[in-house]
């Protein structure tokens, strides 16, 4: 059985003291591939460096909405250059965060449009951060949906009606360890009902550690708890859940197949 952590932040200093051990624990737990996510140009460059050094790691480049007020045109140019690196498989995370409002909402919206356009220009799937900005996120993505190369709503936090709207646009939904939290009934319903072919798993490590490690530093190895809960919710064997979500991730991000002969019959759906 293999799993893919489609969203973690291995470059953050939370891992400075034991990053090699974190990666080894992930591999031992059946996590065959990690996608480490860029949060700004510097973070994106570090993510690429990790991907260059490890064949089981891929990188994305992006600019988190918390920092939108500091985003410059020079940053956009640098992200455009970094996004052409062969180890980069996605553009993000980008999006809107109206929960913490660390950057003014009008600035977040303007820069979100700028970043979407670069991701489309690069032909990369988008990794979308949407927190308490559901309608606004839909509006921005709808404005350019004909040109999108697919993407994922990371750490999906809405209800099933919202899920259907993103799914109808061709997006995948990525489920983190929050489905193990006692009061997460809404996201558990989404996980149980959504099409299996659009489901992805992630840790968002070092954040959002699942039960029984909630409140501590998260790491990719702990995604096994999320996978087990997702399989339980869908009433399918864990091996089937792992096979489906791993195939989904390989298709969306064009990752190399672990066993090409075994997977050659699977066709990847085209973005809508």
Image (cartoon, grey):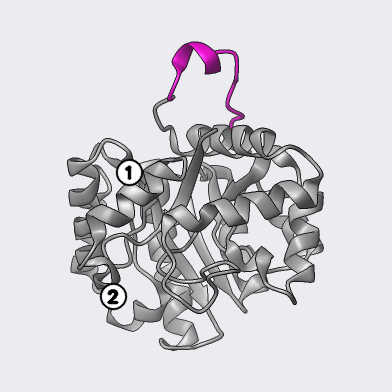
Work out whether residue 60 can be spotted: no
Q: Quadrant of the N terminus?
A: top right
- Label of residue 71 in the image: 2
Left or right: 231 in relation to 22 = right
Q: Earlier in the sequence, mark 1 or mark 2?
A: 1
Work out whether residue 167 can be spotted: yes
In the image, the segment drawn in magenta is 258-270
Sort mark 2 into few (<14), some (14-19) or many (20+) by Cα contacts within 10 Å. Answer: some
Left or right: 225 in relation to 95 = right
Q: Residue at x 67, y 72 (%)?
A: 181
Prevailing SS of the magenta stretch: loop
Residue 61 location, quadrant: bottom left
Secondary-structure class at tag 2? loop
Q: Is residue 260 magenta?
A: yes
Residue 98 location, quadrant: bottom right
Residue 189 horizontal/vertical position (percent) = 81, 60
Q: Residue at x 35, y 62 (%)?
A: 9
Q: Is residue 91 magenta?
A: no
Q: Nearer the viewer, residue 138 or 255?
A: 255
Q: Residue at x 68, y 33 (%)?
A: 240
Q: Residue at x 39, y 64 (%)?
A: 114
């Amino acid at each position: 059985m293999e799993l893919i952590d489609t969203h973690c932040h291995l470059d953050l200093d939370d891992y400075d003291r034991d990053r090699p051990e974190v990666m080894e624990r992930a591999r031992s737990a059946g996590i065959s591939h990690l996608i480490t996510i860029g949060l700004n140009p510097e973070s994106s460059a570090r993510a690429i460096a990790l991907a260059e050094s490890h064949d089981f790691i891929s990188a994305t480049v992006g600019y988190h909405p918390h920092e939108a007020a500091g985003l410059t045109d020079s940053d956009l140019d640098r992200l455009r250059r970094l996004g052409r690196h062969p180890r980069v498989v996605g553009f993000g995370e980008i999006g809107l965060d109206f929960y913490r409002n660390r950057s003014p909402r009008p600035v977040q919206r303007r820069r979100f449009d700028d970043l979407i356009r670069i991701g489309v220009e690069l032909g990369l799937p988008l990794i979308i951060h949407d927190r308490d900005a559901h309608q606004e996120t839909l509006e921005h993505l709808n404005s350019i949906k004909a040109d999108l190369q697919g993407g994922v709503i990371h750490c999906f936090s809405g209800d099933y009606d919202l899920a259907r709207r993103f799914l109808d646009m061709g997006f995948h939904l990525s489920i983190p360890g929050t489905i193990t939290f006692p009061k997460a009934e809404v996201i558990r319903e989404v996980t149980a009902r959504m099409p299996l072919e659009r489901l992805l798993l992630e840790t968002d490590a070092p954040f959002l550690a699942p039960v029984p490690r909630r409140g501590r530093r998260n790491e990719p190895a702990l995604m096994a708890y999320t996978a087990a809960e997702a399989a339980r919710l869908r009433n399918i064997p864990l091996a089937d859940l792992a096979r489906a979500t791993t195939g989904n991730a390989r298709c969306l991000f064009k990752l190399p197949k672990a066993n090409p002969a075994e997977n050659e019959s699977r066709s990847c759906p085209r973005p809508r």
